[in-house]
Image (tube, grey):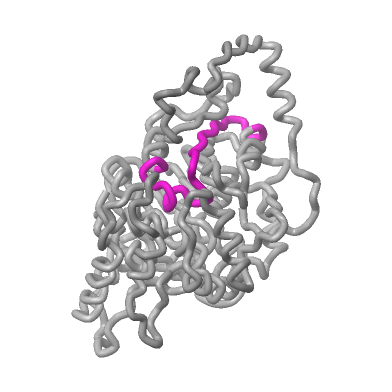
Amino acid sequence: MSSLPRLAALCGLLTALGSPGATVAVPEDPASTSEPELGSREAPDGREVENRESQSPGAEARKREDRERVGRGTEGREAEHRFSKKEAMEEAAGDQEPGEPGPLARIAAAARASLTEAGLERLEGEIAGRRMVLWRGGSGPDLVLLHGSGQQAGSWAAVVPGLVQDHTLHVLDLPGHGESAPEKGILPMDTVVEGVETYLLGLENEAVLVGNSMGAWLATILAHRHPDRVQRIVIVNGGALLNVPAEGLTLMPANREQARKVMEALRAPESPPLSDELLDDIVLRSRNGPIGRMMQDMQGLMAHLLDGRLHEVEIPVDILWGESDRLIPLDYARRMESQLPRARLTVLERCGHIPASECPERFGAALREILERPPPDRSKSEGGEAEQRRRGEAESTDSVGEPGNPEGEEPPEEATDETADEEESVDREEGPDGGTRAPEEIP
């Protein structure tokens, strides 16, 4: 993985919550007002999709500058944090002049540029009557990547290089996000679903959907509605069940401390702290971004939940979960697994709400392994496969006992079929906590 996608990915979590609603394209040089050259190609649904790439020297110079800034000194690694996200993003911000986008928007722009560097083509066209921007490329089965609320296509930048060789990737700016319309006003869930649904139905073949956060919710909805068009789904730290966040957490922080608290809940505890400047940027952009706009249609959001209906989702579902997520905790994933007919849970240790950004190498490896394996079947008692801990922290070589038994105790007796059935029955009886308070989190 090149240095740019590596750092863009590690910064993607901040961009996701900190720049909702911001146009993340790198701004062109003010002196350049010429119309960009347009190329076109036909979308799978027959609509003309334009490929808009600015040819102005100013824009190209700015893109190079952003890539150099974001990529500088990024030979760090995931676990040891040899570089600081805080320092890297402050450097990416540079000497910001009045009127220029803040550090979060500039980092998002660098991440989006790296999608093109990975071999994807930026396309722009009309889907469901609205402008949609997406990146497409690669070779193989169709794989559609759906980001979360407040994010944009660049949040997948770090995992694209590992997927593009074996899949035809479709990386969308969801409606109302990134550069996809609508840019202002209330953003109903109906609008978001309609845009992705229209694009999916226009594809020639069945597709695999991978969704994070709200993207996982969308993937579940589409799998439920169109089992003939969706081959399987992978849902990452999100879903279509009601989730009530812990008290004191809000995705629309009103001040720096609220922003700090929600960012700590979204990431692993060992993640480096964020600067006050970045937290202030999150507060500044949150209220009028996609999250705030979607929250204005709470009734529409609630109408798309599938509580009590997950058993109707017949296609295979892999649940890939960042264990450190305290906004949508692991119990939520277990609840989904117990209700879905064909589900398999894989847990990523030391990863939070957006694993593709926080732990891209381990997330990418786990995702590729899932896609290479046969999909989960209807059996849920396959020797512990119901919950797998993959790509987690390496076992200590000086451990007293065997992996999973650090105290060196005798391993427990294997459960009989009767015991396994009883345990599964208990799991299946677990349900929502009965709370009726409207959720602030978009699943």
- Residue at 51% x, 34% y is 346
Q: Is residue 413 magenta?
A: no
Most extreme residue toward the bottom is 31
Q: Quadrant of residue 370?
A: top left
Q: Measuring 58% from the left and 50% from the top, which residue is drawn there?
A: 217
Q: Quadrant of residue 386?
A: top right
Q: Which residues are magenta?
A: 338-363
Residue at image position (68%, 62%) is 300
Residue 30 vs 228, above or below: the answer is below
Question: Total marks drawn?
Answer: 0
In the image, taking residue 387 as reference, residue 35 lies left or right, namely: left
Examine the rendering and report whether any part of residue 19 can be seen. Answer: no
The x, y position of residue 314, in whole percent, is: 59, 34
Residue 385 place in picture, x, y as percent: 53, 24
Residue 357 colored in magenta in the image:
yes
Residue 34, position in %: x, y?
A: 24, 86
Q: Nearer the viewer, residue 260 or 202?
A: 260
Q: Is residue 311 above or below residue 186?
A: above
Residue 416 visible here: yes
Res 413 quadrant in image: top right
Residue 414 vs 222, above or below: the answer is above
Residue 74: give x, y in percent of width and height: 28, 56
Q: Residue at x 22, y 81 (%)?
A: 58
